[in-house]
Amino acid sequence: MSAFRRGFFCIGLSYASNLGRLSGALVRRQVMEFPTVIRKNWISLSAIGGLCAVPFSQKQDNLSHEALVRRASSLVTDSTNTFLSQTTLALVDSFTQYVKTIHTLVTLHKHYVASGSKLTPAEEDSVWQVIVRQRQEVRDLREDCKRFESNWMMAINLSKLAAETAYNAGADQASVTAQTSLQVAQSHVDQIRQLFKDAEKNLKESKAEDSQRIKLPAAMEEEDIPEAYLRED
């Protein structure tokens, strides 16, 4: 049994060695297919343990480190501007939809309160079910607004940091562009946020979100029904 284990272990070592050589050959062949600059950087990173797979561009002879940093900071501001514009659009759209849904709920609730006692049981139930669904939509949209506002605040903070970084790096135009994007985004959100607050106030005052269902008048009592209708045939 001991001899068998030693033989099995030797076979395993041989297999692992062959597999390692095969894997190494495949990696070397794939590396040789990379462009020259990327291949050099990839090999350098592999030599220090393969901790990162992101290739670093070598410094160009006609560009200083300061110029490369300015270029990189400009790219960062471009990315943060895009993130800010998209999160602003999402937030404004969600606020707008929320305000419209509240307006619909409040209007529907006022109509229900004013004419609910005049409706038949079937009509009252139909209107009430619409109110219930509208209330749920208001709650769902409120959660969406919170989520998009959180993303927007993150985008604002990133844009401020990118603008400051670009300014410190000497990328003045990128810094100005980032600051302008911040001002535009803040202006749009401030406008829709005021409508949001007004809608929330209107919703609270109307009690359209938490009012109780109207109790319709009870059906005629048995003693009020004419005796002729109570007689059995």
Image (cartoon, rainbow, N blue to C red):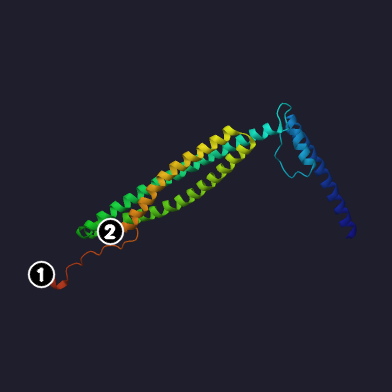
**Mark 1 vs mark 2, CA separation in Å:** 29 Å
**Point 90% across, 57% down: residue:** 3
On the image, the x and y values in percent for residue 65 come to 71, 33
In the foreground, 231 or 109: 109
Q: Residues within 10 Å of mark 1 (few under 14, many from 20)?
A: few
Q: Which residue is mark 1?
A: 226
On the image, the x and y values in percent for residue 38 come to 73, 33
Residue 228 in which image quadrant: bottom left
**Point 89% across, 55% down: residue:** 6
Mark 1 and mark 2 lie on one chain; the one further toward the N terminus is 2
In this picture, is 107 found above or below 173? below
Quadrant where the image shows the N terminus:
bottom right
In the foreground, 171 or 102: 171
Query: Which-is-in-front pick, marks 1 and 2?
Result: 2
Is 143 displayed left or right of 215 in the figure? Answer: right
Q: Which residue is mark 2?
A: 125
Q: Are marks 1 and 2 in contact (CB under 8 Å)?
A: no
Q: Report if residue 208 is visible in the image.
A: no
Residue 124 in which image quadrant: bottom left
Q: Report if residue 180 is visible in the image.
A: yes
**Point 44% across, 44% down: residue:** 189
Q: Amino acid at mark 2?
A: Asp
Quadrant where the image shows the C terminus:
bottom left
Residue 73 in which image quadrant: top right
On the image, the x and y values in percent for residue 225 come to 13, 69
